Image (cartoon, rainbow, N blue to C red):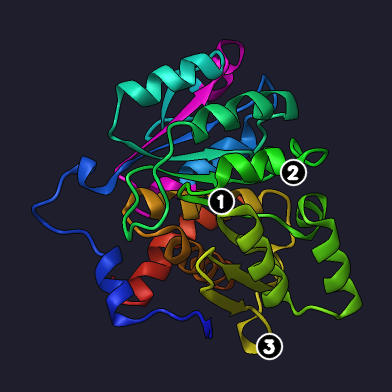
Amino acid sequence: MTLQIAPDTALRDRLAKREEAHKYSYGHAVVLAGGPGKGGAARLAARAALRVGAGLVTVLAPQAAMAEHAAQLTAVMLSPLADGYALRGMLQGDRRINAILLGPGLGLQRAREMVPAALACAAQAGDDAPGRALVLDADALSAFAEEPQTLFQALRGRAAVLTPHLGEFARLFPDLAAQLRDGALTRVEATRHAADRCGATVLLKGAETAIAAPDGQTALHRAVGDMAAPWLATAGSGDVLAGIVTGLVARGLSPFEAAGTGAWLHAAAARSFGPGLIAEDLPEQIPQVLRDIGV
């Protein structure tokens, strides 16, 4: 069965914060960044994760990019990260880190090193609230275009969300993308086959965003007609969506639930702002959207 995503009372209750809670009650998300001059995407994602309610968010960047990030980050924390070995050590040493975003502005070479290191420390899939979940976007997907099975084998059994646009989807699942273009598969069917193949939740971005989990659950978010959000056709909006999903898994939502909720919040934030939207505006609209639904 395919569910059409909409906010409900149970979701509003989960997005609210308890008066007796503290920051670690809502998780610690980390966003890996690329080299100097490439950090904007990671900062957009990190701010979105913080705005959606993650307790702490840290950008992990190469030493050479630290000054660039330090000049622009305040509530989002910053820490140097040299390589995959250092990432493993950090994740093994701090179990409070429970959500990891890799991809926005990461760079293909850095992605090929960091993704396997992060997956080695990810939680097993299947729990309603995974201990540590990964979100893979942008370069973390394209880096494995030549050998997608390498990524799929590492993903299987892990708590993870992939957030491709159609081009990235075609790099990892060329046969499914061809069948989607030819009309042999619907968007939901293609996404469901992709999730089964890679063993992770897949969110295929678009005006009709399809979401599927490896266990066969599917959902569809239709930002069309009266619910259209055409202003999302702007650079960086996908990085913000990846950050929203990361913040939600940090808060304890399952990968499938975080993907669906994130798609809805992303479009709602764009509609709330309207014409003239740029990616920096999206995280700042999240508080208003949450107020509107009674969180």
**Mark 3: secondary structure:** helix
Residue at left offset 50%, top offset 79% = 5
Magenta span contains residue 284: no
Q: Are marks 3 and 1 in contact (CB under 8 Å)?
A: no
Q: CA distance from mark 3 to mark 1?
A: 24 Å
Which residue range is magenta in the image?
48-69
Q: Which mark is residue 41?
A: none
Q: Earlier in the sequence, mark 3 or mark 2?
A: 2
Residue at left offset 77%, top offset 50% = 172
- Three-letter amino acid code at disc 3? Gly
- For this view, does 10 lie left or right of residue 185? left
| Residue 240 visible to the viewer | yes
Q: Position of residue 254 (x, y in %)?
A: 39, 59
For mark 2, what is the residue?
148
Magenta span contains residue 52: yes
Q: Are marks 2 and 1 in contact (CB under 8 Å)?
A: no
- Three-letter amino acid code at disc 1? Ala
- Three-letter amino acid code at disc 2? Pro
Residue at left offset 60%, top offset 17% = 65
Is the residue 139 above or below the residue 220 in the image? above
Along the viewing direction, whichever of 225 and 218 lies nearer the viewer: 218
In what quadrant of the picture does the C terminus appear?
A: bottom left
Q: Earlier in the sequence, mark 3 or mark 1?
A: 3
**Mark 1: secondary structure:** helix
For mark 1, what is the residue?
242
For mark 3, what is the residue?
225
Q: Position of residue 12 (x, y in %)?
A: 30, 73
